[in-house]
Amino acid sequence: MVLTVVESFEEASSSVIDSVFASRYVREPLPRYRLPEREMSKEAAYEIIHDELLLDGNPRLNLASFVTTWMEPECDKLMVEAINKNYVDMDEYPATTDIQNRCVNMIAHLFNAPIREKEPAVGVGTVGSSEAIMLAGLAFKRKWQNRRKAEGKPHDKPNIVTGANVQVCWEKFARYFEVELKEVKLTEGCYVMDPAKAVEMVDENTICVAAILGSTFNGEFEDVKLLNKLLTQKNNRTGWNTPIHVDAASGGFVAPFLYPDLVWDFRLPLVKSINVSGHKYGLVYAGVGWAIWRSKEDLPDELIFHIDYLGSDQPTFTLNFSKGSSQIIAQYYQFLRLGFEGYKNIMSNCMESARVIREGLQRIGRFNIISKEKGAPVVAFSFKENDKSLAFKLSKALRYFGWIVPAYSMPPDIEDLTVLRVVVREDLGRGLADKFVSHVQVALKEIDSSPAHTIPRITFTIDLKQSGDIGVDGRVVPRIVTREEESGTEPRKITLTSGKTKGTC
């Protein structure tokens, strides 16, 4: 959710809405920030809004976002058919509830959860990975508090250990639910959490260590297997039994299909919960996410609410209540439509497009690639030149071609590194990847040919008071009048002259 600030009428460019095409139906200007006095035809309302939305960017050219921007028309149709169903009303919409449960079980099996025959998986559909992380964090906090209370120990200072590369939703969880966030600092050349340093920061108040499968900065996978090994050793020494949560928002629907031998999931004993974004490489429009727990014992019963005023007993574990069913239905469509083979093919295509972009940028010769070939389909790169402004100039120049490519500074301790990031989604095919590289080349030529930043030619005139003024050599002088012009990149100079007194400042 974005906090909205309404412009005052004095600040707004216009306090009314005009629409070219809707003017056939509406001839009077409409208020921008207040309800209109009268109703209008549906055609006019549509045209007014459609007209304004033309100013939005093209979602397919938005390389800043991991979020899915294209689905098949059949799935779009299913989403429209389910748009008026409230996902939380399980008694009224049992088929939708069953579909949600099927998705949870499919994902749990994909992540190798230790589920016995005919035993249901433990998980929940969420608005996105942010909500899933909030729920997983609350479960860890409550289990830690319960254990500390049973041991008669303080339980008021919980903390989570993460890398400084975590997505902002982890900072939100820490602030909203009063948990200290202990971040492992990044270093030059290492842009993800170091498992050894993370384990060193673990103490008796650590509710979990959060590992990232697909860093938001460069798409890199953290070494969850090594983290599990080192943390197991520390748990054996201390008796703390600190668990692991894997934030697989970006990589959870990539790793199982491209790197099946990579051990990062419930195959590791300390991994107790995993979140994944269905609206990223799960290939569903925003917003849907999933939180999956290793077993029922890892989700405290007191966090589950049972409601009966919608028709029957309905257990829920969500931060919100009402939610549309469309994205859940869309996720199930993708699972049925694609299967393991289909997801594998799409992820392979994404990685191929990422390779085309990565190699194209390397041929240009001006970039360092800081993403890894093994990770999420992301190409993160920085300029070799020691000029932080170049990344922002290139980001701005690419917008003239319609591309949205973010430029940003890395976290503290490596904040001098400015990075551009390209997220490759299913709808960025080989042709668009080639076109993007060619547009980067054109944009660089435009940047290089633009005039260097110079200090404008300025004339300084200084007329000091008639008496009591101090000259540059410290003596009192009666009057100084000087004029000098400077341009280019040299420092501004003012020459002061009065008799034999002369100086430059």
Image (cartoon, helix red, strand yellow):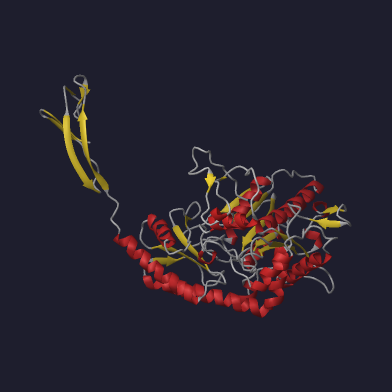
In this picture, residue 19 sits left or right of residue 119: left
Q: On the image, which quarter does residue 101 sit in?
A: bottom right
Q: On the image, which quarter does residue 86 sit in?
A: bottom right
Kindly give the residue lying farthest to the top in the view shown: 467
Query: Can you give x and y, in whole percent of width and height, for residue 126 in the image?
Result: 71, 59
| Image quarter of the C terminus | top left
Residue 34 vs 388, above or below: the answer is: above
Q: Residue at the spot x=50%, y=62% of the render?
A: 190
In this picture, residue 222 sits left or right of residue 364: right
Query: Can you give x and y, in whole percent of width and height, for residue 182 in the image?
Result: 61, 50
Q: Residue at the spot x=19%, y=20% of the render?
A: 466
Res 195 seen here: yes
Residue 455 vs 275, above or below: the answer is: above
The residue closer to the viewer here, 33 or 298, is 33
Please give the count of numbered marks on the rendered protein.
0
Res 260 seen here: no
Residue 497 vs 320, above or below: the answer is: above
Query: Can you give x and y, in whole percent of width and height, for residue 407 in the image?
Result: 46, 58
Query: Can you give x and y, in whole percent of width and height, for residue 216 in the image?
Result: 56, 60
The residue closer to the viewer here, 461 or 224, is 461
Residue 428 vs 12, above or below: the answer is: below
Kindly give the residue lying farthest to the left in the view shown: 499
